[in-house]
Image (spheres, helix red, strand yellow):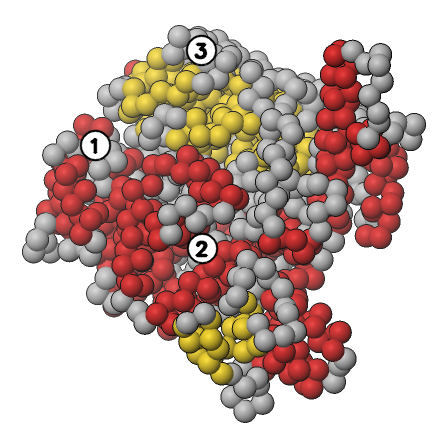
């Protein structure tokens, strides 16, 4: 069923797009929600009737299909948002914005969820439902080191949303809420007769034994929690895993041919297709590949926002560098990136800046953490998606090398000469001796040569 | 007992049709020797259903003891029912995933040179070099691809239980019974004695069980028989943070791959796996489901989970977001402890090195064993997948290391 779901996303999306067709789709109206008017909404009835007409099916089937669309997050209810069901009556519904579609690759990260819960907590004190409260506390413990950042982001987002029209604000809140209901559904203790539809009644029966045996009893919630995230990950990386899928052109350990390594060094001019693809999986993938980072830097330079990545690298250097050099590095970073009129000034919000400046008086390894996270998120949410849509990236993909898997050698017993490669320590020594002792950016970029 | 070095047994358990699963869950479990999910004994048909038991009338002879026993009984039954449902669902989900095809892995290199048991190894970021340490006090750096030895250091102590390659490839760290972790910059001057430039970094009050560089050459994380883990500044040897919470020797650790890069997991003789916040030194999550020492912990590539290998002959998977164990990898035919575990690049496979000289390959999602690899002639003590996932290396008490692909 899990595989089935992923294959079915594009088909579901086709239906959704058809439903929104200006001529042949559902006639949208303004719907009233208490005293606010929400534009571009429809009723449950509208959905069922449209499906019946479009696909020439009976009401029961139309209701079933519509219900699936709701449960997978493509349509969400405005009334009773936590009950993701399609009601064939005047209940108002809206289409979920494509950004939040379940088929989007980017995994809903812990930080994103933490920010969402914090926003909710701030906005309506004590309005978090039990499972949300639990998740909030758990996250608070687990990512405590970035909690200041989480709170600041939440406050920023709330401030920005206050400046919107009420209708827009409600819509955005509903969209976000629906998204998180799908991505972080409640997990409840199982009592034998609890029905799937009764999700509205959050049962508070305490689990009887000490360890938290949370159980998921609904098909679709299974699809988006534990098994799904691991299945999704393994699926995504399947063709990149040499043990599962082979290794173009061949696995060096098996054929003694090091072409695969030669094609994937950090100094290669044309990267391979698999490698460039991988940069689109998650932002960390892009950043951890020195070549990926370089290419991303080129893009940022064109956008005049390269200072963000430089700042992030400098912060990494502080976090992972020698203890003794911290005060000096912190001062340098401040001068270059944060001071008024700095040559590579980065746009950090005022609260974070205030806190960072406080910390500068007693510089430690973590003093730049909040600012670093802020800029990291800026890049992740803004520059990164645009980079993936940019011509620069698309060209890389088009020009990328995709070597063919070579067949087994005709003479399997003929051993190829196994070339040695320069020892990374030797390379580093040579560089130093040449007087090129400057650090190649952050410690992470300094990776040993892999050329043959 | 052992087959030839290239022999491989393929163990492919076929999928059941989904509709059979629920009905045949217990029977299937009894038939097959593998299991996914939590241990569940098949319920004997003579025991009353928990719901029924609750409605039994109170008898005059019921003492506090018997009532207590009954309540414990009920509790256990309820847990069983819950676990069964959980089992079925996890199993049901895994059923729909396509089974892995034929799986063939062979020894591609054998590294001979250690004079005694190999205890630990680590890969260099260049994907072909490794460092290994052994009971005779020797630490060797190899180009595993050519099988050439490139550096050798003799430690002043025996039983070098931990070694690690620096991210830059310019140094190695090692330690063991000397209670220290020392860093040796690698020099290519054949005449130079590497030991001369040795830097003593970590100081524990008992043996060093594991060490790992963090994201740079400048910081090392260690775990020790003294029950603690610690983070050190390499340059000065200063202790940056210590981690207290294990009730016995800590045997292993692994750093989390994550956006914030601030946590790591450790496993110990107290049967616990703890997740730590590197910044505050606090233990933020703890898992205690193993029945014996945890010898090895390794993060799933996404960072959302980790696997553990234990003397109780099982490997387990813990989901950090759900805050619980989600899978057990075990078989009745596997009696000896797992010493070392690691994931393939996509996280689909889990490799486990065992004390019965074998390596078992598990399908992480479906829970069944995909393959068993023979070749070592003594305990497998250490196992790591290469940085690009093209191969994995195993080290053994038979004095050799093997590269498999």
Q: Quadrant of residue B186?
A: top left
**Disc 2: which residue:** A282
Residue occupying the far right of the picture: B46
Callout 3: SS = loop
The lab-note entry on whether marks 1 and 3 share a chain reads no
Q: Whole-Å distance between the Cαs marked 2 and 1?
A: 29 Å
Pick whichever, A209 or B306, lies toward us.
Answer: A209
Expressed as whole percent of the image width and height from the top left, the position of residue B260 reads 37, 42
Comparing A320 with B26, the one in front is B26
Position of residue A54 measured from the top left corner of the image (x, y, whole percent): 68, 85
Label 3 CA crowd tier, 10 Å (few <14, some 14–19, many 20+):
some
Distance (Cα) linking label 3 and label 2: 39 Å
For the point 17% across and 37% down, which residue is it? A359
Q: Position of residue A194 (x, y in %)?
A: 71, 47
Q: Which residue is mark 1?
A: A364
Residue ranking furthest to the bottom: A23
Q: Is residue B34 above or below residue A442?
A: above
Reading the image, the residue beneath label 3 is: B226
Disc 1 to disc 3, C-alpha distance = 28 Å
The residue tagged with tag 1: helix, strand or loop?
loop
Work out which quarter of the rendered image holds the N terminus of chain A and state it: bottom right
For residue B23, side relative to residue B89 (left or right): right
Mark toward the start of the polypeptide (2 vs 1) = 2
Q: Looking at the image, which residue is at 33% across and 28% down? A: B280
Is residue A321 visible in the rendered image? The answer is yes
- The residue nearer to you, when weighing A255 against B240, is B240
B151 over A421 or under it: above or below: above
Marks 2/1 in contact by CB < 8 Å: the verdict is: no
């Amino acid at each position: 069923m899990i595989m089935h779901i992923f294959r079915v996303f594009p088909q579901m999306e086709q239906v959704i797009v058809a439903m929104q067709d200006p001529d042949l789709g559902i006639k949208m109206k303004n719907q009233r929600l208490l005293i606010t008017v929400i534009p571009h909404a429809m009723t449950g009835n509208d959905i069922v009737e449209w499906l019946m007409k479009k696909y020439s099916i009976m009401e029961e089937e139309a209701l079933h299909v519509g219900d699936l669309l709701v449960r997978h997050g493509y349509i969400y209810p405005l009334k009773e948002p936590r009950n993701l069901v399609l009601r064939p009556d005047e209940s108002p519904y809206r289409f979920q914005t494509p950004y939040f579609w379940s088929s989007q690759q980017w995994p809903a990260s812990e930080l994103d969820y933490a920010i969402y819960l914090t926003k909710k907590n701030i906005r309506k004190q004590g309005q978090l439902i039990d499972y949300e409260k639990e998740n909030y506390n758990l996250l608070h413990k687990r990512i405590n080191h970035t909690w200041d950042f989480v709170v600041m982001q939440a406050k920023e987002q709330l401030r920005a949303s206050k400046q919107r029209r009420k209708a827009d604000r409600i819509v955005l809140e509903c969209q976000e809420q629906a998204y998180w209901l799908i991505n972080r559904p409640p997990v409840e203790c199982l009592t034998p007769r609890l029905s799937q539809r009764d999700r509205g009644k959050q049962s508070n029966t305490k689990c009887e034994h000490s360890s938290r045996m949370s159980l998921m009893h609904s098909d679709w919630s299974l699809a988006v929690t534990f098994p799904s995230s691991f299945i999704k990950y393994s699926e995504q990386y399947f063709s990149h895993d040499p043990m599962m899928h082979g290794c173009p052109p061949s696995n060096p350990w098996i054929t003694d041919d090091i072409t695969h390594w030669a094609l994937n060094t950090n100094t290669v001019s044309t990267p391979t297709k698999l490698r460039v693809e991988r940069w689109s999986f998650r932002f960390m993938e892009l950043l951890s590949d020195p070549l990926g980072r370089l290419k991303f830097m080129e893009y940022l330079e064109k956008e005049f926002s390269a200072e963000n990545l430089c700042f992030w690298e400098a912060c990494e250097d502080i976090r992972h560098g020698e203890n003794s050099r911290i005060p000096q590095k912190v001062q340098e970073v401040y001068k270059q990136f944060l001071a008024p009129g700095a040559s590579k000034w980065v746009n950090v919000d005022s609260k974070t800046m205030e806190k960072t400046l406080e910390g500068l008086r007693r510089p430690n390894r973590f003093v730049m953490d909040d600012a670093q996270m802020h800029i990291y998120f800026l890049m992740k949410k803004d520059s990164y998606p645009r980079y993936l849509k940019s011509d620069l990236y698309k060209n890389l993909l088009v020009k990328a090398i995709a070597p063919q898997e070579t067949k087994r050698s005709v003479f399997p017993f003929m051993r190829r000469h196994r070339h040695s490669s320069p020892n990374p320590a030797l390379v580093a020594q040579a560089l130093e001796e040449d007087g090129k002792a400057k650090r190649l950016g952050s410690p992470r970029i300094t990776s040993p040569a892999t050329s043959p | 007992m052992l087959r030839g070095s290239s022999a491989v047994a393929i163990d492919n358990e076929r999928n059941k049709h989904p509709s059979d699963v629920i009905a045949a869950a217990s029977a299937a479990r009894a038939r097959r020797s593998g299991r996914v999910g939590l241990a569940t004994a098949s319920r004997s048909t003579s025991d009353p259903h928990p719901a029924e038991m609750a409605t039994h009338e109170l008898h005059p002879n019921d003492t506090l003891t018997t009532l207590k026993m009954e309540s414990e009984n009920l509790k256990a039954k309820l847990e069983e029912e819950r676990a069964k449902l959980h089992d079925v669902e996890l199993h049901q989900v895994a059923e729909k995933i396509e089974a892995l095809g034929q799986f063939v892995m062979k020894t591609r290199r054998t590294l001979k040179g250690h004079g005694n048991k190999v205890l630990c190894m680590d890969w260099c970021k260049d994907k072909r070099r490794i460092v290994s340490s052994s009971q005779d006090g020797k630490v060797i750096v190899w180009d595993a691809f050519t099988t050439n030895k490139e550096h050798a250091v003799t430690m002043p102590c025996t039983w070098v239980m931990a070694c690690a390659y620096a991210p830059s490839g310019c140094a190695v760290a090692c330690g063991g019974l000397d209670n220290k972790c020392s860093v040796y910059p690698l020099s290519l001057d054949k005449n130079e004695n590497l030991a001369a430039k040795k830097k003593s970094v970590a100081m524990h009050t008992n043996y060093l069980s594991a060490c790992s560089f963090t994201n740079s050459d400048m910081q090392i994380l260690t775990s020790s028989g003294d029950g603690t883990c610690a983070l050190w500044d390499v340059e000065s040897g200063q202790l940056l943070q210590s981690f207290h919470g294990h009730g016995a020797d800590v045997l292993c650790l692994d750093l989390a791959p994550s956006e914030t890069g601030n946590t790591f997991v450790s496993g110990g003789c107290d049967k616990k796996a703890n997740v730590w916040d590197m910044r505050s030194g606090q233990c933020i999550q703890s898992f205690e489901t193993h029945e014996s020492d945890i010898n090895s912990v390794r993060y799933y590539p996404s960072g959302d989970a980790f696997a553990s290998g234990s003397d109780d002959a099982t490997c387990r998977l813990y989901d950090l977001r759900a805050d619980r164990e989600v899978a057990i990898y075990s078989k009745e035919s596997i009696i000896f402890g797992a010493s070392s575990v690691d994931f393939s690049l996509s996280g689909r496979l889990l490799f486990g090195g065992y004390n019965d000289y074998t390596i078992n390959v598990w399908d992480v999602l479906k829970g069944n064993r995909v393959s068993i690899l023979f070749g070592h002639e003594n305990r497998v003590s250490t196992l790591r997948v290469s940085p690009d996932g093209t191969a994995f290396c195993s080290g053994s008490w038979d004095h050799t290391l093997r590269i498999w692909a």
